[in-house]
Image (cartoon, helix red, strand yellow):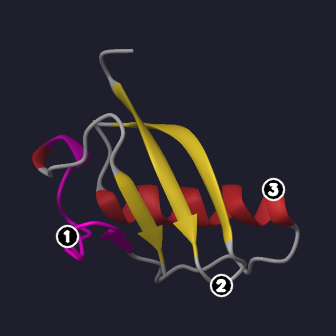
Amino acid sequence: MDYKVLIKLYVPEIEESYEMYIPINKYVGEICELLSKIVNDLSKIYPIKKNACLCNRRSGLIYEKNNLIRETDIRNGTELILF
């Protein structure tokens, strides 16, 4: 699992949280779209968003969409919010 990190994802719109692996060699923008689709599939009520963004739940940092995940501070156990 050297190329993936385990995150805790909180989705405030539906008051749900998930644990999942995300690849570190993808851009944050791609991961946002992917997570939006996954949450939609799992919840059946969350709308798929093309402009979704990720925020660090502890620091409040909003991640730039053109950064690779490995260039951010996202590591195993990081808690993120999907907006």
SS assignment at label 1 = loop
Instruction: Mark 3 and mark 1 in contact? Answer it, CB < 8 Å.
Output: no
Q: Is residue 46 left or right of residue 21?
A: right
Tell me residue 64's x, y (percent). 20, 71
Which badge, 3 or 1, comes first in the chain's sequence? Answer: 3
Mark number, residue 17: none
- Quadrant for the N terminus, please: top left
Q: Amino acid at mark 2?
A: Glu
Identity of the residue drawn at 40% across and 61% down? 80
Q: Say which label, 3 or 2, has the lower sequence index.
A: 2
Helix, strand or loop at label 2? It is: loop
> Residue at (75%, 77%) from the top-left corner?
46
Residue placed most toward the observer, 68 or 14 = 14
Question: Crowdedness of circle 2 by 10 Å Cα count: few (<14), some, many (20+)?
Answer: few
Residue 50: where, in percent of width, then height? 53, 79
Could you classify mark 3 by the number of other residues whose Cα lies within 10 Å: few (under 14), some (14-19), or many (20 or more)? few
Tell which residue pokes out farthest to the top in this image: 1
Residue corresponding to mark 3? 42
Read off the magenta span.
54-70
26 is higher (above) or lower (below) than 24: below
In the rendered structure, which amino acid carries the disc numbered 3? Answer: Leu
**Residue 66 point in image, percent of width and height:** 20, 65
As helix, strand or loop, the secondary structure at mark 3 comes to helix
In the foreground, 52 or 10: 10
- The residue pinned by badge 1 equals 59
Disc 2: which residue? 13
Q: Nearer the viewer, mark 3 or mark 2?
A: 2
The amino acid marked with disc number 1 is Ser
Q: How many marks?
A: 3
